[in-house]
Amino acid sequence: MPAAAVPRPVVDPRTGLRADGGPEPDRLALLGTLQEAFAAAVLATDPGAPVPACGDWTARELVVHLAGVHHWAAGMAAGDDTRAEVLPVPDGGPEALADLYGRHAAELRAVLAAVGPAARASTLVGDGPVGDGPASFWRRRQVHETLVHLHDLHAARLGSGPAVVTGDALPVAPEVWADCVDEIVTMFQPRQVRLGRMAPLPEPVRLVAADLGWSWTLGAHDGGSPDDEAGRRRPAATLSAPAHGLALLLWGRLDPAGAGATVDGDDAVVRRALGAPVVP
């Protein structure tokens, strides 16, 4: 594993902004780039193609799902948590689906730009399913949502998740995939525990993005604050993979072999962690 040339950014899960004084990425611009890539992939994909790792979804249902999530997230960013996330599934071919997606993608970007990152919004951080925080939370959250579903759409097009490679298909740097991992470790997995959707992990697992040398501990803060040093527990095993493989493994899109993962320590501990619903 290479030594980290740059320290891992510290991002506040409540805001989606850096808490270490480092430069903020332009997540709104990145969201636009990923949405454009998704819309282009819609036109290249059979709407009836099954989506690997997404149950019985077809590409049509995936596209409508992400359009609906964008519509819902736009409402959340504006402080309205009453919007429905589910949209009607339209008939028609790729062009009709691309039009539907494009409208809701543009809506989300417009709302995020209009309200600004500091506006009060409904977020996913709080004591219940919905909390309060700044709209910047949604810039980060929707980048990762779009990125993972872009992988899903290319997997449907190619017939296999491992067949999707980074680069032109998934136009982001490893640091973006690493931020996706960070969101799971610091926001989603603790939220799943807090909402009673999973039990705390019996043994934490150290996660290493092998291409960056960055690491996290999944389950270190179950039942406590990510800033609670006294509540940290030592990991029982280490799971290493390139940043994109690590993110897609945690999101259930790849298995360890497809993610290029290796385990140091108790393999059973890693299997239990990967089998838990660490994301919704």
Image: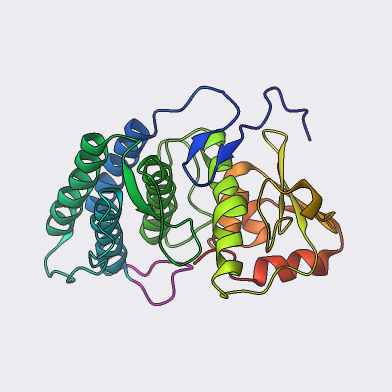
The mark total stands at 0
Specify the quadrant of the image occupied by residue 196. bottom right
Give the colour scheme shown: rainbow
| Magenta stretch prevailing secondary structure | loop
> How far across and how far down the image is residue 53, in percent?
49, 68
Q: Say if the magenta span includes residue 11.
A: no
Above or below for 12 versus 148: above
Say left or right for 27 vs 189.
Answer: left
207 left or right of 13 in image? right
Q: Residue at x 31, y 39 (%)?
A: 119
Compared to residue 58, the image places residue 29 above or below, namely: above
- Toward the viewer: 210 or 103? 103
Q: Position of residue 276 (x, y in %)?
A: 64, 71
Residue 92, position as x, y percentages in the image: 11, 66
- In the image: residue 230, left or right of residue 209: right
Placement of 42 over or under 113, stated as above or below: below
Segment tinted magenta in the rendering: 49-57
Where is residue 4? Give x, y as percent.
73, 28
The quadrant holding residue 136 is top left
- Place residue 143 in its image quadrant: top left
Q: Hey, which residue is sitting farthest right in the picture?
A: 265
Is 81 in front, or is 5? 81
Q: Where does the N terminus fall, quadrant-wise?
A: top right
Residue at coordinates 78% horizontally, 28% vertically from top-left?
3
Task: Identify the residue at image location x=58%, y=41%.
Answer: 178
